[in-house]
Amino acid sequence: MTAAAVPADSDFPRAGAGAPLRGLLPAELAAWVTAAGGPAYRAEQIFRWLHGQAVETADQMVNVPPALRQALAEAHPLRPLTTDLVQTARDGTRKLRWRTHDGRAIESVLIPDEDEERNRLTLCVSSQVGCALDCRFCATATLGFGRHLGADEIVEQIYRATALAGRRPTNLVFMGMGEPLHNYDNLTRALALLEHPWGAAFSPRRITVSTAGLVSGIDKLAAAKSVAGQGSSSNVAISLNATTDEVRDRIMPINKRWPIAALLEAARRFPLSHGRRVTFEYVMLGGVNDSDADADRLPGLLRGIPSKVNLIPWNGFAGPEFVRPPAERIRSFQERLRAASVAVYIRSPRGDDIDAACGQLAARTLEGSQRPPATDSAAQSAAPSTRSAAAAGGLATIRVGPWPPTTS
Ligand code: SAH
């Protein structure tokens, strides 16, 4: 597809009648409460239940009068995600597959830090069902575009993953299925909900929004950020993945709409708080973007942008004809960048044995079936128990490795 065919920004119902309850901002809840004849402070109570306690039904809001709870549930439905599948990889990474109220499958990934001392737990969340951008090396692209996720569905991934993990993620990255800036309104609404002190109160410094390079979205984020007290100051990651337009056009069709120079200008314009940097992701594709010449072009492109580069060895899946470069090639690519004073790190693939690594998320909705995808050998071997547990509405857990992970 061409970038010009990217669908409109958002199909999330506005805060009017019928808007999903967990997507409402405090001011919107207050307006509803007041219109319903309740005192304004109920909005804070309700918000705390929805985002601090992550209740699953309005009935659980025990300090809210039953009549108000009922009116609220009627006016604004909850659209819960159901847990479809949990898989644990050998390295402790856990892939969580959710089903939306309309039967779509989406995935999040819980990634414990390799260094246990740091005790970091990163949650990678999805912003769309499928994706419209058609990056050639990405598994989600093979699904095509399903729909945008509502802000309620975005934040619910985080609350449910927190419950499953038994602890709050320390870091949130929008690097799951979908292009977050293509779903700008719901993304920014979700950030406002997640950062609100009445709710989960995530620090924006612990949140990273990753984009394939939607310049209009990057500029919108920047503009929102510059209005004091509005907009999120979360981090931005840009999936650069090539050093020439010729190659980037080929692997990321969005580049035809916003080529490298336009994208880097947007990165240059982006307002950064003190000490913050733009992250550039660079998926290493053997023989495509991993040459010495690429390594030598990159520092010039990034000049003037406070930045760091993450090299991501390509994670394979059935279909495209890419190869991951040999480890040696990746290291020498890194060395060349280092020699040019670029802050550059190699991201080790996490959860690749359960298809949970970068770019491998491609949950398909299986009509009339709870079977995991056929490509997933670990899931296949456990399919019978999965089916019965999922059919009973229970939690299907497949353990491939220990949890919490042990270091070896
Ligand atoms: N649409 C957003 C977020 C989702 S992709 C974006 O493009 O940034 C998250 C990251 O995974 C991106 O850096 C992308 O380049 C990378 N990625 C996609 N497919 C991959 C694969 N098969 N192997 C390794 N990284 C991949």
Image (tube, rainbow, N blue to C red):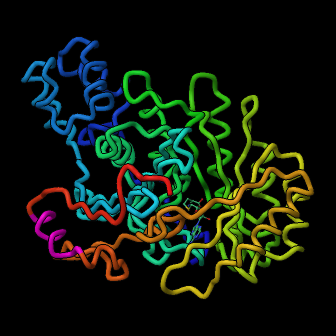
Classify 122 as above or below 138: above
Residue 304 position within the rendered picture, expressed as x and y whole percent measured from the top left: 88, 46
Residue 101 seen in the figure: yes
Residue 37 position within the rendered picture, expressed as x and y whole percent measured from the top left: 17, 16
Classify 76 as above or below 30: below
Q: Residue at x 52, y 43 (%)?
A: 116
* Magenta-drawn stretch, dominant element (helix, strand or loop): helix
Classify 175 as above or below 235: below
Q: Magenta stretch: residue 112 in it?
A: no
Q: Quadrant of ligand 1?
A: bottom right
Residue 124 seen in the figure: no
Q: Residue at x 72, y 55 (%)?
A: 345
Q: Residue at x 48, y 31 (%)?
A: 202
Q: Is residue 383 left or right of residue 217?
A: left
Q: Magenta stretch: residue 384 in it?
A: yes
Judge by depth and name the residue closer to the eye, 16 or 295.
295
- Give the image quarter of residue 151: top left
Q: Which residues are magenta?
A: 382-391
Q: Residue at x 13, y 37 (%)?
A: 74
Q: Is residue 209 left or right of residue 112?
A: right
Residue 237 position within the rendered picture, expressed as x and y whole percent measured from the top left: 65, 51
Q: Is residue 290 left or right of residue 41?
A: right
Q: Quadrant of the N terminus?
A: bottom right
Judge by depth and name the residue closer to the eye, 183 or 280.
280
- Give the image quarter of residue 334: bottom right
Judge by depth and name the residue closer to the eye, 406 or 112.
406
Classify 49 as above or below 405: above
Residue 352 position within the rendered picture, expressed as x and y whole percent measured from the top left: 48, 69
